[in-house]
Image: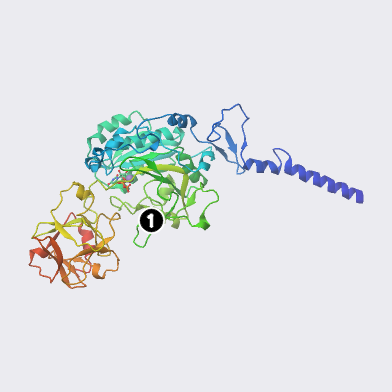
Amino acid sequence: MKRKQKRFLQMTLLFTVALIFLPNVGLWSLYKDKHLVKSAEPGEQQTFPLGLGDGQFYSWTDGLRRKDWHDYESIQKEAMRSGKGEHGKPYPLTEEDHDDSAYRENGFNIFVSNNIALERSLPDIRHANCKHKMYLERLPNTSIIIPFHNEGWTSLLRTIHSIINRTPGSLIAEIILVDDFSEREHLKDKLEEYMARFSKVRIVRTKKREGLIRTRLLGASMARGEVLTFLDSHCEVNVNWLPPLLNQIALNHKTIVCPMIDVIDHNHFGYEAQAGDAMRGAFDWEMYYKRIPIPPELQRADPSDPFESPVMAGGLFAVNRKWFWELGGYDPGLEIWGGEQYEISFKVWMCGGEMFDVPCSRVGHIYRKYVPYKVPSGTSLARIRNVAANLCVDSKHGATGTELRLDICVKDGSERTWSHEQLFTFGWREDIRPGEPLHTRKFCFDAISHNSPVTLYDCHGMKGNQLWGYRKDRTLFHPVSNSCMDCNPAEKKIFMARCDPLSETQQWIFEHINMTVLEKFNQHANS
Ligand code: UDP
Ligand code: MN
C-alpha cells in the first residue's frame, strides 16, 4: 500500500512537470508564446537594426496573430534623402521669406512649403519601444477623411503623399478629400487631375461653405472603410502611424484613438514634438482646451503604451465607422470651427467607450500663425464701428489694463483682420472679447466707473463690470455703472459717459454679426 502510494506520487509529479515543460503542449509554451514565439519556420531572413522586420507572424496567448507592420524598405529609402527641409529639419529662412505675404493665404509660410519636397522625410521621434511593437496581423481598413477649405497646394499634396508613402496600402480603403467650398483655382480641375494618379483618392465637394464639422460629416457619410480616420489638410503622417491606431480599435471597437500631434513650424516647417509631448487632454472652467501632464498614478510602466485621455485634441483621430454613427456622429449644428472635440469626447464617455492617445502613432500638423479664412456670419464675430467717427474699436495693444482705442476700420482680408484685432466675440457670459471664439485672447471689455476709459482686462466671467448689453438704439450699455460706451473721434479715445441715445458718438454698429448670437448676448439689455 505504502509503495503504491509513493509510486502514485512519483507519477503525478512527473506528469505535472511534463505538463508544465513539455514543448508545444506544456504551460511553459504558453509563457513563451507570450514573449513572441515565431509561428513560422525560422528562416534565413535578413534582420534589420530597428526591429524584427522579418515579415513573420507571431502568436500571442490570446490566440491572435501579430506582426511587425514597419515598411523597412521605405524607411531605408527615406533615410537616404537629402535636401532642404528633409528629415523634418527647419528650412533656412531669409528675411524676405518672412514677408507677410507668405502667410496671408494659409496662416503659415507657403513659400517654405513650396520649396520643400512633397515626399520629404521625417525624423522618427517615437519612443524607442515603438520600434519593436507588433500589432494584429488582421487590422480593419480605414477611410481617411480630409476636409479642406482653401488649403495651400503643396501643403495639401504633402499630406496626401505622406499618407500614401507611410501607410500600408492594405489598410487604406480610400482617402476622401472633402472640399468645403474653396474658391482657390488650384483646388478645382488641377486637383482632380493630380489626384487621378492615386486610385484610392476620391474628391467630394460641399455645395456651400459648411465649416469643418459638416464637411467631415459629409466625408464620413460617404465612407466605406471599417474605420474612419480624420486628418487635417496640412499634416504629415510619420513612420508606421496607422497600425497602432487601428490595433486599439480592433481590440475594442468602442474606442476613439488619437495620434500624438507633432508640430510642423508655421515659419520654417521644422518637425518636432509638442512641448511636454505625451500629455492628457483637458479643459478649464471656460471650456478652453488644455494639455496637462499624465498624473504619476496613471503613468504606464511602458511609456509607449496607449494612455487614456479625458478629452481628445480635436482634428486627428480614428474611430470605428459603425460606432461613430451609433454615437450620433457630430452635431451638425456646429459652425465652422471648434467645440467638436468636447462633443465627441463626452459622448464616448457617456456611451461606455474609451479614448486613447497612442504614443507610437505620430502625425505632424501645421499650427497656424493666424486663422486665414473668413468666418462667415453664423458665428459670434463682429467688428464694432462708431457711427460718428466712422472708426472701429481696435484691440491692437491688447494686454491687461490697456485702453481700447478707435482706429481706421481695417479692410476684410488684411493681416490685421486675420489677427483679429478688430474682431470681437460676444459670448454667453455677455462679455466682449477680442478675437474669434476659442482663439480669443482672454481679455474683456472692462470699465470701472461711469466716466472711466474702457480697458481690456483679464476676463473673470462674473459679469459685473465686464457685463455689456447692446441695445436697440445701438448704444453699448454697461449696467454696473449705468452708463454707455462713448468716444472722442478726434482723440480716438473710448470711455464711459451718461447714456444719450441721440449722440452719435455713443452709437456703435456691430458688423458681420449673427442676430441670434446678438439676441442671446443681449438677454438682459433689452428686457
Ligand atoms: N476646414 C474646413 N472648413 C472650414 C474651416 C476649416 O473644411 O470652414 C478644414 C481645414 O482645411 C482643416 C480642418 O478643417 O483641414 C481644420 O481646420 P483648421 O486647420 O483651420 O483648424 P486648426 O487646426 O487651426 O485648429
Ligand atoms: Mn489644422
Return the x and y of residue 83 as percentages of the image width and height.
36, 31
Return the x and y of residue 28 as percentages of the image width and height.
69, 43
Q: Nearer the viewer, residue 401 or 481?
A: 401
Residue at the far front in the pictured view: 95
202 w.r.t. 20: above or below: above
Q: Label 1 is placed on what type of residue? A: Lys
Number of residues whose C-alpha sits closer than 10 Å to that of mark 1, classed few (under 14), some (14–19) or many (20 or more): few
**Label 1 residue near ligand 1, CB within 8 Å:** no
- Res 1 visible: no
Provide the residue designation for mark 1.
290
132 w.r.t. 297: above or below: above
- Left or right, residue 471 beside residue 437: left
- Res 177 visible: yes
Colour treatment of the image: rainbow
**Which quarter of the figure has residue 389?**
bottom left
Is disc 1 placed on a helix, strand or loop?
strand
- Left or right, residue 23 beside residue 481: right
**Which quarter of the figure has residue 407?**
bottom left
325 w.r.t. 144: above or below: below
Return the x and y of residue 15 as percentages of the image width and height.
79, 44
Return the x and y of residue 454 as percentages of the image width and height.
19, 65
Count up the numbered dots.
Answer: 1
Q: Nearer the viewer, residue 208 or 377?
A: 377
Q: Quadrant of the C terminus?
A: bottom left
Q: Residue at x 9, y 60 (%)?
A: 387
